[in-house]
Image: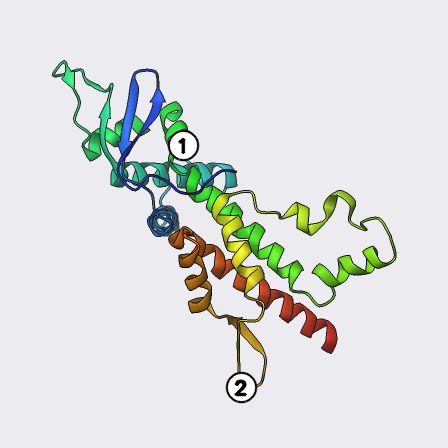
């Protein structure tokens, strides 16, 4: 099973034969900040162009921001360069032609290298893989807990088929299979969520408002689980539980 645990210290990524970069580990928060920064740059450019056009001037710009593909390409260009500038701390295989010597990984040089689309694409794919894997894991565990904690779904739904000796109604689309944990920390979070069914937080009205996160993390700590990543997944699992409760209430009062 694949793990979401990335190196805790700077590590190397092979971009091309003879070209490697040393990067600081990417945190989810850092990726979110870079994403918002890139979005703001595109939005600011769009506003600036619109203001100029409204003033009666014609603007020639190489990117048509009304075209979704070109807009997304510009966004990715900003995102990749921002991530590279803030996380690349060293490299090997880059030559400063003017000095005929190894180039320093300055912000300007990093941006120039990332102008080469082949390098930018490989860097982005390899550097952000942990973030994307975590995002996919969050989506799965939320859907899994949503199904599992539904009164009309999960174990109670499956029990009916078993009691009547019926084949699985979902066949290959069973939520337990479709959203099954695929990563180590995802499996760890699911184990805790299953064991926390009697440790839910209740509002004075008796409505479930979440899991006892303190108790859940104590279980994770006692089992030697990856607390940083498991905590993020537990929050998504908690959201899935609340989604299930909300759906049941809407059905009941609908």
Which callout, 1 or 2, points at the residue further toward the start of the chain?
1
Using the rendered view, name the quadrant where residue 197 is placed.
bottom right
Q: Is residue 5 visible?
A: yes
64 with respect to 142 (left or right): left
**What residue occupies the far top of the structure in this picture?**
100
Residue 239 visible in the displayed image: no
| Foreground residue among 159 and 179 | 159
Residue at x 34% of width, y 16% of height:
17
Q: CA distance from mark 1 to mark 2?
A: 48 Å
Residue at image point 35% right, 24% down: 15
Q: How is the image coloured?
A: rainbow
Local SS, label 2: loop
| Residue shown at the point (16%, 27%) measured from the top left | 104
Q: Which residue is mark 2?
A: 204
Residue 166: where, in percent of width, then height?
A: 86, 52
Q: Is residue 73 above or below residue 102?
A: below
Q: Quadrant of residue 237?
A: bottom right
| Drawn side of residue 237 relative to residue 32, left or right | right
User: In the picture provided, is 70 more to the left or to the right than 159?
Assistant: left
Judging by the rendered image, the residue that carries numbered circle 1 is: 126
Residue at the spot 55% in from the left edge and 54% down from the top edge: 190
Label 2 CA crowd tier, 10 Å (few <14, some 14–19, many 20+)? few
Find the residue positioned furthest to the left.
99
Coordinates of residue 125 in the picture (x, y in percent)? 43, 33
Tell me if residue 216 comes above or below residue 39 in the rendering.
Answer: below
| Outermost residue, front side | 222
- Check the image and report above or below for 154 versus 106: below
Dot 1: few (<14), some (14–19), or many (≥20) neighbours within 10 Å?
few
Q: Taking 181 as reference, is 170 left or right?
A: right
Q: Is residue 246 above or below residue 181?
A: below
């Amino acid at each position: 099973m694949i793990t979401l645990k990335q190196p805790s210290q700077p590590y190397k990524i092979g971009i091309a034969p003879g070209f490697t970069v040393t990067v600081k580990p990417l945190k989810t928060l850092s990726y979110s900040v870079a994403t918002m920064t890139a979005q703001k740059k595109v939005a600011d450019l769009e506003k600036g162009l619109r203001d100029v056009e409204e003033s009666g001037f014609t603007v020639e710009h190489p990117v048509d921001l009304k075209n979704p593909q070109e807009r997304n390409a510009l966004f990715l260009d900003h995102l990749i360069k921002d991530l590279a500038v803030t996380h690349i701390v060293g490299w090997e295989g880059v030559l400063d032609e003017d000095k005929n010597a190894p180039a320093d990984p300055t912000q300007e040089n990093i941006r120039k290298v990332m102008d080469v689309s082949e390098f930018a694409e490989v860097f982005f794919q390899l550097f952000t893989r942990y973030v994307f894997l975590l995002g996919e894991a969050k989506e799965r565990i939320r859907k899994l807990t949503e199904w599992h904690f539904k009164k009309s779904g999960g174990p109670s739904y499956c029990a009916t088929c078993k009691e009547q000796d019926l084949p699985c109604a979902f066949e290959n689309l069973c939520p337990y299979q479709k959203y099954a944990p695929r990563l180590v920390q995802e499996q760890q979070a699911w184990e805790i969520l299953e064991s926390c069914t009697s440790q839910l937080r209740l509002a004075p009205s008796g409505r479930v408002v979440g899991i006892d996160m303190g108790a859940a993390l104590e279980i994770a700590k006692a089992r030697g689980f990856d607390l940083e990543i498991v905590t993020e997944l537990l929050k998504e699992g908690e959201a899935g539980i609340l989604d299930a409760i909300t759906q049941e209430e809407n059905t009941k009062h609908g």
